[in-house]
Structures are given as C-alpha cells and as structure tokens.
Amino acid sequence: MRVTCSKCDKVFNIPDERLPMGKEIAFPCPNCKGIIELDLRSKAIHGNASEFEENMKTDYLTGEALKNKILRKVMDLPPMPQTVLKARDIMANPKSDFKQLADLFETDQAIAAKILKLANSPYYGLGGKVSSIQHASVVLGHKTLGELITMGGTSSLLGEKLEGYGLDAGALWKHSLAVAFGSRIIAQKKEPSLTNDAFTSGLIHDAGKLILDPYITERWELFEEFMSGGQKTFLEAEKEILELDHSEVAAEVCKTWNIPKPLTIAIRYHHHPSRSQGSKLAYIVHVADALAMMTGLGLGIDGTLYQMDEDALEILGIQRVEINDMMGDILNAAKKISES
C-alpha cells in the first residue's frame, strides 16, 4: 500500500502483508515522526458499503488530513504581485498623485508592459495609441486603469492549464475575464457603487481551482464515479472527495493576497449567494458566472449541471429580457481583451 504522511508529505510503500487489515491503525512517520493514521477496515466489515466508499479508502490522503494539506498549499500559490497591491492602495488614497503610481511601475516593467498591451487591445479601441501608464490613466480614466492593473497582475497566473477541470491553457483566463466583465456590466446597471469591486471579484473568483486541480487529477476516477448518475455536480464532488470546494479555497487565497473582506465574501459564496448574508456583490458574481458559462467561454468539466440561484435575478432587479444583451456584451468584451 502507498501511504503518504500528512505532515511532511513523504510517501512510503508498505507491503500489504505487513498491515493489519480490518483495523484502524496509527504509527509514527519514519521521516518526521508525525503520526500516520490508516483505516484498513475491509469491505466485508462495512457490509453494504458502496464501491465509491470503498474507493475512498485508498492510498489517497482523505478527511481532515487532506483538507489541512490543501489549505497549506494555498501558501505556495504565487502571491498577487506586490505592484498590484501597492497600486490599489495608491489609487484608493484620494491624497495620492500620479507620480507615486508612475514611480511604482518603474520598478515592475513586466506588469507595466502587460497593462499597456491590454490598454491597446481592440476592446478599448485606441489602436496602439496608449504609450504610458499615465497616458492610459488620462485617456481611459482612473477606474479603468485599476482594472488594467488587476488584469495585468493576474493574467499569467490564471493562464495555466488545469487538467482536472478540463481547461486548456488560457481557458480559465478567458472565463475569468468573462465573469469580470459580466460582473462589471451587471453592477453598472444595478449597483453602480460596486462596479470596481465587482470587476476584481469576478476576475479572481475561481482562483481556488489553481490549488485543487492536482488533487482532482489524482483522484479523477473518484470524481467520475461520484458524478456517474448525472445528478451530482462537480462542486458537490469537490466537497465530498476533497473536503473543500474551490470557492472555499479561493477565499483562503484572498486572505493571502490581502483582498478586502467584502470581495472575499463575494468570492466565497459566488456559488451560493443566499448564504452570504445579503452580499449584493456575491449575487452579482454569481449571475455573471452563470452568464459566462452560458456563453461557453472557458467552459470546463465543472460547468455541467450549473444552476443559478432562483432568486438571484429578482434580487438584482434583472429582467430575463436583459440577459441576451448582457451575454452579448460579455462575449464581446472577453474576446477582445483575450486577443491581447
């Protein structure tokens, strides 16, 4: 049997004949002296245990040990670039001036280059005319510059291939863009004061997938079996098999990135906004996510059986006749930006 220590992640191959099958055991890890716990109770002892339940009793780490390991991995995720965080602070301070922002980007030319590339994308219609960060601020406005900075800082991170979710390289980025622009469109129409926060929340709402993907890939047979009846969602499979779904992990990522609490709450409950204690931002990201799924942009395996909260449209004051226009705007914006 292949056994992994939850404390040091060391993997050991122990011959089955040396294990007391039918029992639950605990022994010290030879590497770090932490305690390894194993459930070796047989199928016969469990009687009517389903095949899925039996497969869960494999060499994979499970339960609280798995949950704790996943949460520790959040700390290994590349941090939100400090340039982005500092830029947000500067722009939020009414006493700051543009020179502070310009000086900041002189220290991070890579992100500055991405911002200029995005500013010159077909979406903004300026055709290569934006030559500097200051120029972008003048011709596009302070708020749009904030969006560009956030996009520039997250584009590489969200561009990875996610095998477990069935997302090719760039697919998560396209979906994230669609949800970001969808959130902004909805906020502009229904809750203008939330426009900036809506865009940022939409852009990073699925950051938890970056952490969960390798665990899903490793346990793919369990996911397939759990959803085989066609009644269980991918989100339910995450929770059942990994102890955490990607929205919970994304909320932990937000903490390490110093994302403000209102945005963190919206991201944490973007699948279940009714649990957010009335966060309009959570409802906005939830609806934008559903609309982005409907456009097909960056649609992964987890898009199957996606359900919109039945009260979400009413709470936001969205009429069903508005949906098609919103989807068209989302598709147009995300495609033009992703061309950059």
Image (tube, rainbow, N blue to C red):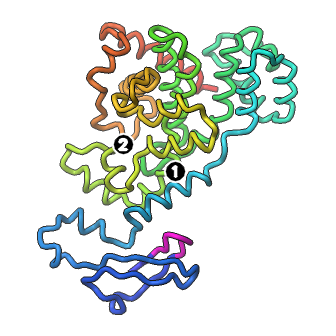
- Looking at the rendered structure, the number of numbered marks drawn on it comes to 2
Q: Amino acid at mark 2?
A: Ile
The residue sitting at the left extreme is 48
Left or right of residue 289, residue 337 in this image: right
Q: Residue 209 appears at what percent x and percent y?
A: 48, 45
Left or right of residue 139, residue 41 in this image: left
Q: Which segment did they paint magenta?
A: 4-10
The image quadrant where one finds the C terminus is: top right
Q: Which residue is mark 2?
A: 301
- Is residue 297 a member of the stretch shown in magenta? no
Q: Residue 116 appears at what percent x and percent y?
A: 74, 23
Return the residue nearer the eye: 23 or 289.
23
Q: Amino acid at mark 1?
A: Ile
* In the rendered image, the vertical position of residue 83 relative to residue 49, given as above or below: above
Q: Which residue is mark 1?
A: 211
Residue pictured at 59% horizontal, 31% vertical: 260
The residue sitting at the front extreme is 277
Q: Residue 62 appears at what percent x and percent y?
A: 38, 65
Q: Locate residue 33: give its quadrant.
A: bottom right
**How far is the residue under mark 1 from the one under mark 2?**
16 Å
Per the image, label 1 sits on a secondary structure element best described as: helix
**Residue 38 visible from this viewpoint:** yes
**Residue 292 visible from this viewpoint:** no
